[in-house]
Image: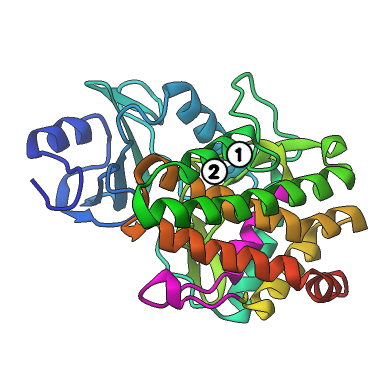
Amino acid sequence: MVRGGAHFTEVELDEVLGHYNIGEIVHVNSLSAGNKCAPKMVIISKHGKYLLKRRPKGKDDLYHVAFAHSVQEKLDKKGFPVTRLVETLDEDNTILQLENHIYELFEFAAGVRYDGSSEATRDAGKQLARFHRSLSDFDSQLKPLRGSFHDSTSVRHQLKLVSNSSAGNDKVKLFDIADVLASLYNNSSVRVNQLGFDSWEEQVVHGDWHPGNMLFCDGKINAVLDFDSIKLAATVTDLANGMLQFSIIGDRPTPAEWPDHLDEEKLIDFLGGYREVIGLGDDKVSSLLDLMIETMIAEAVLPIAATGFFGNLSGAEFLAMIRRKAKYIDKNRDRLSEAIQSD
């Protein structure tokens, strides 16, 4: 078995590729990227270069995958930079089901990872707005999941689980951290609701707009790679999450070494790119910092409540870092609000 996660067997790979008309296979190679439970293979054939993905067993149902594919096909027709799906030979379908597994084959997208430049950051915001605009009138008989990290009973429940999850000194530490995070989360939820969140229209959103889910070429997004988290929600939740993902600083060995502050230039660049395409009312702009606090807490607490870790990082250390960063946004909200309002 390939160390570090799920993999394709030779028999499985032969059977799966037999369902596609991509010509004689020249070379295959595993790709170590993303979810380790979702193995990926780069396939080079006489017809071109492809990426084969097996979805994690039990994580996604067929209905959700079918909706995601319908969104990708809509975006492709609109000229949005997505990785194009390949249909099966025998069923004329972009979803292949074998032995309770779901497979997808994509045309391979070239590009490089996010380089942190102002140009790439601004284009990431601009393309998120294009994503929202392209799907503003999207309608389908298939319906996706609905909801977001905002004002979530699930997030509050997970915070309670975390506060009671460890023994000894860690238990005291986690209880204190979770208590502060719950207060920050609740206060932000109240402020966003007072701005009229419940009246803001919902549509299909990406749900996971971060640098690892896209490829760039010459400072522009060449392909958006991951549509596993699409759902119905207010677009401002997608925007706030994107602003956080592109401005958070976490490039040091341990969370304890990560700084409290955000990269404010990237924060402003990302939002500026978005507003080139879609204008925002004052109420929605005013909600962004609190939504950033909410999404930061929600993204951290869910895996830590389940496993005690965030990836391979200590849950207590990671949440302590999240507390510092959330408190930084809260403490500096007036200055940060002025910066994003005036962009």
Q: Is residue 250 magenta?
A: yes
Q: Secondary structure at mark 1?
A: helix
Who is closer to the viewer here, 104 or 237? 237
Who is closer to the viewer here, 221 or 319? 319
Q: Which quarter of the rendered picture does the N terminus lie within?
A: top left
Crowdedness near tag 2: few (<14), some (14–19) or many (≥20) residues, C-alpha within 10 Å: many
| Residue that badge 2 annotates | 159
**Residue type at numbered disc 1:** Arg
Q: In the figure, 11 relative to 317: above or below?
A: above
Q: Which quadrant of the figure has residue 101?
A: top left
Q: In the figure, 243 relative to 145: above or below?
A: below
Residue 55 at x, y percent in the picture: 33, 36
Q: Which mark is residue 313?
A: none
| Residue that badge 1 annotates | 156
Residue 60 at x, y percent in the picture: 41, 29
Residue at left offset 69%, top offset 54%: 184
Residue at left offset 54%, top offset 55%: 176
Crowdedness near tag 1: few (<14), some (14–19) or many (≥20) residues, C-alpha within 10 Å: many
Residue at left offset 50%, top offset 43%: 227
Q: Is residue 265 left or right of residue 169?
A: right
Residue 47 at x, y percent in the picture: 28, 49
Task: Give the extent of the magenta segment.
Answer: 236-260
Dominant secondary structure (helix, strand or loop) of the stretch shown in magenta: helix
Residue 340 in view here: yes
**Residue type at numbered disc 2:** Leu
Q: Is residue 23 magenta?
A: no
